Each structure stands twice: as C-alpha cells, then as structure tokens.
Amino acid sequence: MSATPDLNRRTLLRRAAAAGLLTIPAAGLLSACAGSEPAQEQSSGAEKSKDNPFGVQDGSSVKVVIFNGGLGDQWAKEDEAVFKAKRPNVTVNMSSTQKIKTEEQPKMATQPSDLIMNSGADIMDISTLVNEGAIEPLEDLLAAPAWDSEGTVADTLLPGTVNNGTFQGKFYVMNVAYTVWGNWYNAALFEKEGWQPPKTFNEFFALAPKIKAKGMAPYVYDAVHGYYPRWALMATIWKSAGKQAVIDIDNLKENAWKADGVLPALEAWEKLVKDKLLLPGRLDHTQSQQAWLDGKAAFIQVGTWLKNEMAETIPPGFEMKLSDYWSLGAGDKAPNDVYAGAGEGFVVPSKAPNKAAAMEFLRAVLSKEGSAKFAGLTKSLASTRGSGDNVQDSALASANELMNNAPQDLISVKFWDFYADLDKESQNLSAELMAGRLTAQQFVDGMQGAADKVASDSSIKKQTRSA
Amino acid sequence: MRYGVARFVTGFLALPVALYLFYVVWPFAQAAGYSLTDWGGYSDRQQFVGLENYVRLFSDELIRKAFWHNVFFLITVPLFTIALALFLAFLLNVGGREDRAGIRGVFGSGLYKIIFFFPQVLSLVVVAVMWQQIYRADGQGLINGVLMKIGLVDPENPITFMHDPAPFLGVPAVLWWLLLIAVWSGAGFYMVLFSAAMQSIPKDVFEAAILDGAGRFHTFFRITLPLLRDTVSVAWIYLGFIALDMYALVFVMTPSQGGPNHASEIFASVLNFTAFQKGQFGYACAMGVALAIFTILLAAVQLKITRRERIEY
C-alpha cells in the first residue's frame, strides 16, 4: 500500500512495449511465454513434523521476491537470517523490486517465484489472481505452530489480519505489515500554538481559521493518486453510516451508496474543499507529505508508513503524531472505529515449485524475532502482536495508542480489491471531489452508477464479505 | 547470380530472419490468437470466444473516448511538429541573407541546430519526468513559479496542467499540455530530417528564385515545400505512429494514468488497464490488434494519397 510510483526507464519501456508502443502494438509480448511447459512440481517433500509443519526438504531452494517500497527491504534480509538459523540447508534466493506485476505476472502461468510480496503501485490484481486460481490458499500456514512462541501462527496475528487476507471464504494473502491510517499533525507545533487536534469535522472547521491566520493551509492531500483521499472519504463514511453500510457497499447491494449517513459524510469533505481549506496546487504523495513537513499545511492523512517514507527529510524538532480520522459528531453510528489493517501482502503462486519452503519462510517472517526487527527497522507495526513493544518512536507510539483505545471493529473496505472497475472509478471520483469538480451528491450518484454497472455485468465474478 | 552466392546470402540472412520471426512476428500472431479467447493472463486456462472481444470493442464507451483522444493527437501532433520543424529548418538553411557564399541560414544556425535537436537525445521518460517539474501544479513548478513571481498567476490558484480536464476548443486542457511536450520533443529530429532534405536541393534553384525577386515566403511555399513532399510524407506517417501511441507521456505524467477522471485516456492506457488491472488479456489483445489494423490502414492510405511524380535533380 505504501505506493512508490516512481519509474525507471527500463521497466517503463518494457511495459510500454507490452501496451503497444511504436508502429504496431506488440500485445504479443504480453503473452510471449504462455503455453510453454508447466513448472515441475517439487517431489513429495520431507516428512511433516511439529518442527517442520510443511515438510520442507533440505537441499531445496526457495525464490522470494520482496517489494522494495516505503518500508525498504532491510527487514526482509533480517527475516532471511531468522529463516536460515533454523533451515540452514535451504537456499534462499531473495530479490527486491518495485515492479512486482511487471516482473512476476509473465511468469505466473508457467514458472513463478515461490513467494511474492504483492504490493505497491505495480501490484498484481488480487481478485484476478484468486479468480484465475493463480495463488494458493494459506490455511495451512494459519494452523501451523508459531515459529518461536506458543500456539499457532493465527494466534500471533493482530485482529483484522486474517479478514484482510480472506477472499471468497479462503485465506489467500498473508499481510505482514500492520497499518493504521489517520490524520497526522506536528505535535510540537500544536503544543506551541495551543491547538487541540480535532476529533470531529466541526472542531476542525473551528480550528481552521486559526491555522490559516498563521499562514498555513489547514489540510493537504495527494492529488495524483486517487486512492489516498479515498481512504479518508471511506473512513468518514464508515464512521457516519456505520459498518453495515460499508459492507453493503462492498457487496454491491442495491442503493448501498444512498444509505443514511453516506451523503453527510461526503458533504463534510465537500465543505472542506469549498471553504478553501486545502493547500493550493496539485501535489503527489511525497510532494504533499514534504509540504506538510515544511509547515505549509497542518494536517495530512496517510498510513503509518509515512515516517519511514519521509525519514530523510523530517526537519529537526518536528514531532509526527497520528490522530484518528474526524467523525461528524453525535449522530455518527461508529465515531470511534479506527482505520487499521494488515497490508503488504505475500502470496504463494499455485504453480510455485517449492510451496512448502515459501510457507516456512512466511512463518519466519511472522516470528517474534522477525516481527520485532521489522518494527524496529521500519517504524511500522508488524501484523503480529507486540512487534512494536520495544521500539521508541513518537509516531509509532501514537499509532499504538490509537489502536489500544480502538473498539473491536476496525474500518476496512474491500470493494476496490474485489472489482478493478470500481477501484478505478472510485479513485477518479475521489480525486474529482477533492478538486472541487464534483458535489457530494454527484459523487454518490457516480459511485452508485458504477456499482450498478459492475453488479449487472455477468462477465465479472462477484465476491462478498460478511464481516 | 553466380553459383553459390544465393547460398552465401541465405546463410547470412537466416539467423536475423529467424530471430525476427520468433521475437516479432510470432508474438503478433500470438496476440491475434489470444484476442479470440477469454484469457486472464495469470493462468494457462483460456476459452475460445470467437469475435466476441471485437464486438465488445464497439460498444465500449471508454475505448470510444480513448479513440477520439488518439485521433486528436493523430491530427495535431504531425501538424504542429511538421509545421514547426519546417519553419526551423527553413530558417536554419535558406532563411538567412544572401551573400557572396550564396544562400545560407540565419546567423548562428549551427548552434540552434544543436539546441533544437537536443530533446531527441533524451529518452521520452526522462523528458516526461523533466516536464513534471516544469508543469508542477504549485509555486515550486517552473512555469507556475515564474508566473507567480511576475504576478500573472494567483498563488491561491495555480495552473493545474495535468490535472485540468476543462475543455479548450472542445478538447480537455490536459491533452493540449501533453501535445506541447510531444511537439517540443519531436520537432528537433524532423528539423534535422528536413534540413538534410533541403540541403540536397540545388542552391541554384533558390538563387534563381531570388534573382526573380521571390521573397522568403514565396521561396518556401513555391520551391522548398514542393520539393520536400516525399520527406514530409514520411515524417507524417512516423508522427502518426507516435500520435497513436503517446503511452509513455500519459503513463508517467497524468493522474491515475489517463486521468483526471479519464480526461487523458488513450488506446494504450485503456489497454494497459484492461490487461493488467482487470485481468482481461484476451480483450486487451483484441484492442491491440484493432489498433494495429487501424495503424496499417492509415499508413497505406497516407502513402497512396501522397504518391506523386518525383522530381530529379
């Protein structure tokens, strides 16, 4: 989820070729390797035991691909060491990249890597992977004993992690980073000015003139990637209209976008735009984050990878703190629910030659030792319990605090993972709303129209969620 | 042909032809094959669906929108690029004063040639990344920054370039801004191409025209342009190909790769979304094949129309 949409020339050209550059569209490149020999299945494997729950064979090798984005890839190298300590006779071939789909998709039908961290802007569409049967369900991993603590792997996971990785009733995606979203502010500045971080939109609207008086914009957002503002919009909808309303939206229920509470949530955002509380200009994620760090704006909304992503340019004396998304007020159905969940998902391709070792590697990633190193290196929580206990960091501590006070339900939205069309449309409309070109009512109508179109399209496989 | 020569030539050609067949022709054939299936791209399961994908193309609103955007580029990119390139080439070669050395370009034309050609040396992605900074939609952008300093742009309301879908002459502003980059980066190469063609026109033709009292305007339209017909025609076709592509610029520069809200969607961006995000490779291949057919037809028509007698000199 920590998007790093930067490009390098080589991969762009490769994709450009794939999408039809120059004189004749070379769509054939897309498919150049389909239809060749299927990969050879690893032979039966070693005996399964409590210490070797998947029957990993000594002398085998496992190919692991890491997404090298906002979280870097140093933590993965630490995990490799954890893995090697217990399985010295298994060769780990680890590589890291930002171009997951570009590099891994062409191999999926024939000879895929064993374990792929499917993340970033260049991500392989999860629904397509599930629908095509291209990835393996990971129930065995959940049921396996934990690497270095009591109980099963499932017991060690934070709430929401299993739900986040479940598609069509099966657990497919092992998300390893736990992200908390919300509004960030500079605690040092707020203390100096005597400002209280608002809890509701009305408190924010009351504080805004004071922020403006200091020559700051109250709010800045990423105007290039529509999924950034979309998190905030959906969080407000969840808080205002309640959990069931978002579940209905995800399930494409009739008139789900017209449910009580959805429109008022979007109207709060419409007011924020109309009242000119945004920093002028159209910035991307890092530019907007830098503008916030430079004190040009008071609030920015993003996930907990922010600290690691901007680590090099945080000015001295800047104290990053996370606060919950604002609610509308007393009439809200779920004002205190926090937007959090596991992201940065690993998948095991169905045709991977060494699935046992891939799952064993995941077990190592989720170990106490591995998780602690992850939190220490990335200043983000791992999706296992207690990973951040020993890390001293104000940003991480504020996220921890938010989680500790959170009710049982966590905000989660699925429709953009379920349907690529809705993903695109909701990103576009979110950006339009934030640009002031759409009213809240038009946004609702547009999303309802897009949802109805997907619902009535028989060529799209439908998915549902119940929790 | 002498005995053995045929075998000798075949021996040398066999390898490149085989490589060409395998890496160029075969993927094309494969794409055409996949366009008749519902292949999703991530598995080896696929079903034959006949021409269904092609039928779908004609009722796809997004494709239609993308098609018209491509048509916009198809008309404007060659038109503006060639006009600018011709103008520059003319000034650099025959636009200057006439002296004892005969006809020559304007003063300092050697330097200008290098400057104008320079964008051609840069990869299109580098160009796009550079223009991102020029077009940056706040006070730190090159254009916005300068205009704000002079007071022509309100700091509260910067020009939004890639984020501006407001129509100008019926076409979203973002497409015009992209056009500017395409023309800027393309003109240099065609300037050099036209310069070379102009230099092969004998100087005495120009001198005769000047003796007869023709000004620059008449020299250009009565002599230079007609004699460059072949070169311009070829340039038009090449630029047509570029206009049907435009993928790199749209991909790197526009929000949501085709945004805002589909305002800069082109064939290639829809194809990319359909194949990689939606996982409908079969349908995406159909788009590619359709675009290929369109491109080939266009080139054929173009060559047919512009074919004329050559003037030998």
Image (cartoon, grey):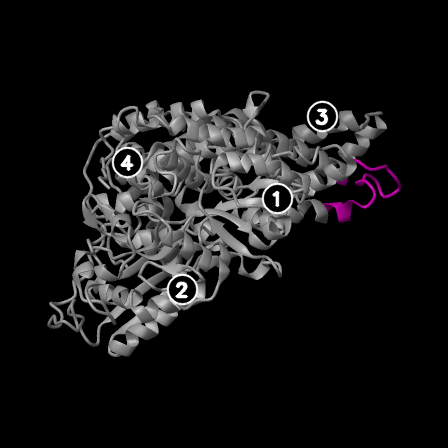
Q: Amino acid at mark 2?
A: Ala
Please report, as a chain letter, where disc 4 is located: A
Question: Are labels 2 and 1 assigned to the same chain?
Answer: no
Q: Amino acid at mark 1?
A: Trp
Query: Residue reaching furthest right?
Result: B100
CA separation, marks 3 and 2?
Answer: 71 Å
Question: Are labels 2 and 4 assigned to the same chain?
Answer: yes
Magenta stretch holds residue B96: yes
The secondary element bearing badge 2 is classed as helix
Tell me where the magenta segment starts and ends, as one range: B92-113
CA separation, marks 1 and 3?
Answer: 34 Å
Residue in the picture at 56% in, 57% down: A319
Residue under numbered circle 1: B131
Question: Are labels 3 and 2 assigned to the same chain?
Answer: no
Q: Amino acid at mark 3?
A: Phe
Quadrant location of the C terminus of chain B in the rendered image: top right
- Comparing marks 1 and 4, which lies closer to the viewer? 4
Q: Is residue B217 visible?
A: yes
Please report, as a chain letter, where disc 3 is located: B
